[in-house]
Image: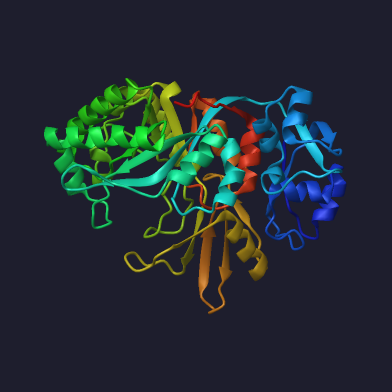
Amino acid sequence: MQIHVVKSGETLSSIAQNYGLSVQYLQNINQLPNPNDLVVGQTILIIYPEISHTVVQGDTLTSIANQYGVTTIRLLRNNPFTTQRQIVPGDTIVISYATPLVGSAKISGYVYPNVNLDYLRTVLPYLTYIAIFTYGINDDGTLITIDDEEIIALSRDFGVAPLMHLSSLSKDGTFSSELASKVLNDIELQETLIEDILSTIKEKNYSGLDIDFEFLPAEDSQNYVNFVSKLTSRLNQYGYIVIAALAPKTSADQKGLLYEGHDYFGIGAAANLSFIMTYEWGYTFGPPMAVAPINNVKKVLDYAVTEIPTDQILMGIPSYGYIWTLPYEKGVTKATSISNLTAIEIAADRNVEIFYDETAQSPFYNFIDTNGTPAEVWFEDARSVEAKLMLIKEYNLVGAGYWNLDRPFQQNWMVLNSLYNILQVPLV
């Protein structure tokens, strides 16, 4: 695998010719938003097929997979266009790539219930787990449900384990520290909630639970550990997994409401896996910077591995970027979240060069918007994703998880596919 950074004067045709690959192939694996108008500094992923198959009349993905002794999921991963349309005679199907894998990994991701299902089909081949955001909690301890049946069924069709996502969302539609604290301090409410969770998981055919109680006060830290432990014990009896989301801490005594209620050692021991939310340094109300600067991510992982076994840690990866208007004014400026493809489209439209911050390992650029206002963009590309994904190997983590899966970012999945064998788990 190589990552080509576009230089001035280059076209997709000239790049394809330089690497001995076809334009259509590069477009397929990169999902370029602007194939006829590349941006200086934009990344083009270069992966060389090792074994390929030319489709003939009567071929199906299943028959091709059987012919070469691979799985259909592997073919879907290697050929992203195959989830968008039927294969036809003359199509070239990549059976394997020349790039050697660096290891195996479990991959999770979060998705909203209203995600486009056609798009979701293009992502599911690269996942182990998918958590559907989010179930909330009523005052009486019962669940606030969501419309999730189609995603659950579709995930299972792809061999992906669907997880109920439980957060401290209240009946008012807001995330409530008070509600979470109420549950954590009331045994009867906990019992009601756990029974409703179990009943819903069984009824809807989930494979487990992803729990995400954020902004807990320090005094609820041990109560949260106890609750997650109780949940895990009950759900594991039926073969269901429990994953707990954790704020990105760098020390046990880190101050702040986001951090104080999350005991890494306690939650790590209580849950089956821990998902560490290593993103949102650059965020809606903060100053312009990378969403997940790798130097900051590594500081969190350096601490995490001292408290939680590495084979139980999923590292968070953002699949989006932000636009800030300039100058940034604290308490006033509000960044807008955008997809990584939109970031490239804006750069192409405004004819600006994309730069790469070597410390943060993240792309960025500045431009003048249509109103004449200066703005700054930070986002993710093939380089920044590769840097983050290599931390799985560096820290010997079990894998990674994405927030979130609602926006296309094909380069990410192809980089992931080039580095790791994505593990699937038996579906309960």
Q: Is residue 19 above or below residue 252?
A: below
Residue 205 seen in render:
yes
In the displayed structure, 363 sits above or below 306; it is below
User: Left or right: 322 with respect to 68?
Assistant: left
Nearer the observer, 28 or 386: 28
Residue 71 lies, in percent from the top left, at 68, 27
Q: Residue furthest bottom?
A: 371
Residue at left offset 13%, top offset 32%: 187
Residue 270 at least partly seen: no
The image position of residue 156, as x and y in percent, is 52, 35
Residue positioned 32% across, 20% down in the render: 237
Give percent across and percent down for residue 21.
84, 44
Relative depth, front residue between 177 and 150: 150
Task: Residue at 79% x, 37% y: name it.
Answer: 93
State the image quarter where residue 265 is shown: top left
Quarter of the figure with residue 270: top left
Please count the marks in the image: 0
Q: Is 152 situated left or right of 180 in this image?
A: right
Q: Is residue 284 above or below residue 397?
A: below
* Camera-nearest residue between 329 and 32: 32
Q: Residue 206: horizontal and vertical position, in percent?
A: 41, 34
Question: In screen coordinates, is 404 left or right of 254?
Answer: right
